[in-house]
Image: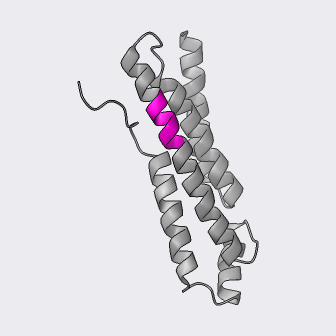
Amino acid sequence: MAITEFLLFVLTATIGGMFLCGANDLITIFVAPECFSLCSYLLSGYTKKDVRSNEATMKYLLMGGASSSILVHGFSWLYGSSGGEIELQEIVNGLINTQMYNSPGISIALIFITVGIGFKLFPSPFSSMDS
């Protein structure tokens, strides 16, 4: 891989992180970490001829797919509980208006969202820990 591709992946991951910092709706909160993590997958497999790099990339990709599904599932719980809103302020207003802010559904949604984002933004991939 050339240095140009490496720098492009790092720049795209940085842009994804910047969009995540300014996100105020569920769609941006989902797309920005995906941009960040897809570049992280590519960077973890930067050395194509190394077997451990390929293994790390595959594990990271599978864990990223699972965390994306968990995150979307939490977003769907939050979307449904708030009355169909996607902006964060409107979600809060919808939860207050419908008296759903103390419901178990919100707790489940927040657990799923925390786990999904936690795995998505974990600082290092679950690569082969054994040497």
Viewer-proximal residue, 64 or 40? 64
Between 74 and 25, the one nearer to me in the picture: 74
**Number of numbered discs:** 0
The majority secondary structure of the magenta stretch comes to helix
Question: Left or right of 66: which side holds 82?
Answer: right
Name the outermost residue toward the left: 131
Rendered view: 95 above or below 99: above
**Residue at the location (57% across, 25% down)?**
9
> Can you say which quadrant of the picture contains the N terminus?
top right
Residue found at x 54% / y 19%:
6
Q: Position of residue 37 (x, y in %)?
A: 54, 38
Q: In the rendered structure, does residue 39 fall within the stretch colored magenta?
A: no
> Which residue is located at x 59 percent, y 16 percent?
5
Q: Residue furthest right?
A: 84
Q: Which stretch is magenta?
A: 58-64
Which corner quadrant of the image does residue 127 belong to?
top left
* Residue 39 drawn above or below residue 76: above
Residue 45, horizontal then vertical, whole percent: 47, 21
What residue appears at the point 45 percent right and 21 percent down from the top-left corner?
A: 54
Quadrant assignment, res 7: top right
Work out which quarter of the rendered image holds the C terminus and state it: top left
- Depicted 7 relative to depicted 76: above or below: above
In the picture shown, does residue 47 fall above or below 21?
Answer: above
Estimate the x, y position of residue 62 in percent, counting from the top left: 51, 38
* Residue 104 percent location from the top left of the image: 53, 81
The coloring applied to the image is: one colour
Q: Is residue 74 left or right of residue 27?
A: left
